[in-house]
Image (cartoon, rainbow, N blue to C red):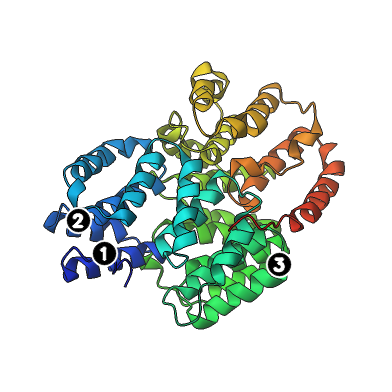
Amino acid sequence: MYGENWIKLHKLDDVVEFNKALSSYLYFKKDSLDIINVILANNPNFIMANCFKGFLILLSRDKNKGSELDKIFDIIKLNTLKINDKLLIYINILKKWNSGEIYLVQKELLNILRGDPKDILALRLYHFNQIFIGLDENYLNNHLQILKKWNEKDEFYPLVLGMVSYALEESNNYIDAEFYARKSLDISDKDLWSIHALCHLHDSNQHNSDGIHVLNDKKIEWSIYGPMKRHLWWHKSLFFYYESKFKECLILYDNYINNDDFFYLDFCNSASLLIRLKLKGVDIGNRLDQLKKSADYFLHQNTLPFIDFHLILFYFNLENNNSNYFLSKEFENKYINSDYINSYNKSLKPLINILDKNKIDNINIISDNFIGLGGSFAQREVILLQLLNINDDLENNYNKIIKDNIIKKKNIINNDYI
């Protein structure tokens, strides 16, 4: 049972319910927050449950939910005497994350994992946060070192294999990535992230028909899952996209990918697919206009460069758009005072300038595949497609730069974990 040595101050029933909520989150189910809210309704002073709720809110990348976090911090302040060392670390992580100090958060999560490599919550938070701030040179090696501490007897071992597979795939180690993803699914077919890793593999290797079958062949009870299922359907749409089956892309968009909830990944999935289709000359009707309500919701938040590059491309492709916001001091100033200033200066600002002038002055802008903006290569690829649309000559250099970068990335493994 998770945390049995440091959250046992609470009644066993509450700890059991907490583990249900954690399991729901780890398996991408949609009821994790509902379970936590029930726990807190019965026991509002369950500090780790409050912390976990805070993490779920922060994982939504939605600054409009800040008042909920204020209530959580008020409860924590009133219960400082019941906090042990492990809880103090998690509370500190919650505070730093809420303050936007995401790089310090990552260091703290790695510190937890050095002492307790089987802390599945710390591992999952580290794994996902790093994706959305840009994978660093230690990402793969950290996962490989942690994996050494796990074995098949551990409850969440398949989930760890899926995370390792993703880290390998994004480092272009496709053979090992497939091995770990399939090993995970052989043990348990309930980890959407391992299925997701296979989708990335088929996307990277252009085995698009195989990728479609990965999703078709799995008997998944989609109704119990949250936004992750829509992200997998987005991957399926990419397989159709690369085979020029654009009608199938739009069917998937209308029936499975597009969602009315204001969740950042749903918006990014939707914008990415529609922009790709628009650049191909596909008639997407008024779908971009319909997506504007969601885009406007996130417009002034500046939560992550990952979200903002989707917003920038969205408004650039939308008539009567809000592109001028990204040229404003308001937008720049929020990044100047954030952890993401380097990503802004290196990638976001040049991208904005290119789109504003509709001209590329220096093709080397694509040399690192915009890694600092976070997300997977499959997600960032829409930036490169947009730039190719601006400058046809860029295509002559595109494949060479990507090939050189893949060779370079294969060698980025160092031993700084411990």
- Whether residue 248 is visible, yes or no, is no
Q: Nearer the viewer, mark 1 or mark 2?
A: 2
Few, some or many C-alpha atoms within 10 Å of disc 1 (few <14, some 14-19, many ≥20)? many
Q: Position of residue 54 (x, y in %)?
A: 31, 48
Q: Which residue is found at the position 45% from the left and 49% from the top?
A: 108
Instruction: Report the residue marked by disc 2.
Output: 46
Work out which residue is located at the far left of the displayed protein and give it: 42
- Report helix, strand or loop for mark 1: helix
Indicate the quadrant where residue 41 lies: bottom left
Instruction: Reply above or below: 294 against 84.
Output: above
Residue 132, position in %: x, y? 53, 47
Determine which of the numbered discs, if any, sits on residue 265 in the image.
none
Q: Is residue 240 left or right of residue 323?
A: right
Q: Tell me the residue that label 1 is attached to.
A: 18
Give x and y (percent) for residue 55: 35, 50
At x 24% / y 44%, what residue is drawn? 72
Residue 238 location, quadrant: bottom right
Towards the viewer: 220 or 49: 49
